Image (cartoon, helix red, strand yellow):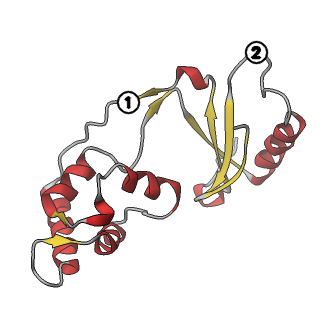
Amino acid sequence: KTHRRLKNVIVTMDFTPSKAALQEVAAVGKPFTVDQEKTLKRAFLGADGDSSGTISVTELKEVLRAVDVDVDGEDGDRFFEQMPDVQNRVITFDELKHYLTQRMFYRVQAGRYYVIMSLFEAECMRAVLHQQSALPLIPGRDTTVALRTERTLLDSTY
């Protein structure tokens, strides 16, 4: 019996048995711990150069990167789309905290699964996707599959 080591993870497969059955899970997050709030506040104050208590969208991206929130790629774009008029105004610490605790940065969906794959497994799955390119992956089903490496979409059925 062998165990895969996480450092050998090459590809993540995003698998949805039925696209129609996907359901958004309520976006109610847990409150910040004292240490998490201190770290966020420190990053916020560091970006607030004029001590106004507000930051711009550029500074917001710096704050999020400082607290290990990835603001690049699809998820980052989706996060900023959900923040009303953020491109044209400044944001306060309380607003930032609200957006992060409401988990507006990422979606959680019931019916979506993630599978870690080796390079060999991903190559096999990619071959299947290409064989079925003009057909549904599973005949009669609305199953979707996407192969990703970090932020890069390699292949998908949708």
| Closest to the observer, 39 or 77 | 77
Determine whether 8 is above or below 144 in the image: below
Give percent across and percent down for residue 64: 32, 66
Query: Label 1 vs label 2: CA separation?
Result: 26 Å
> Residue placed at 32% from the left, 72% from the top?
66
Which numbered circle lies on residue 119? Answer: none
Q: Is residue 45 above or below residue 6?
A: below
Going 58% across and 59% down the picture, which residue do you hit? 151
Q: Residues within 10 Å of mark 1 (few under 14, many from 20)?
A: few
Quadrant for residue 146, please give it.
top right
Q: Which mark is residue 25?
A: 1
Q: Residue furthest top?
A: 140
Where disc 1 sits, the SS reads loop
Q: Residue furthest left?
A: 52
Q: x%, y% of residue 65?
A: 36, 70
In the image, residue 77 lies at what x, y percent?
A: 46, 57
- Label number found at residue 140: 2
* Screen quadrant of the C terminus: top right
Is the Cβ of the residue at disc 1 closer than 8 Å to that at disc 2? no
What's under tag 1, amino acid-wise?
Val
Classify the position of the N terminus by image quarter: top right
Query: Within the image, what quadrant is residue 67 found in?
Result: bottom left
Amino acid type of disc 2? Gly
| Residue in the image at 29% along x and 52% along y | 84
Mark 2, other Cα within 10 Å: few <14 / some 14–19 / many ≥20: few
**Residue for point 9% across, 76% down:** 52
152 lies left or right of 32: right
Q: Earlier in the sequence, mark 1 or mark 2?
A: 1
Residue 145 figure quarter: top right
The residue tagged with tag 2: helix, strand or loop?
loop
Q: Is residue 101 above or below residue 88?
A: above
| Residue that protrudes farthest toward the right in the picture | 131
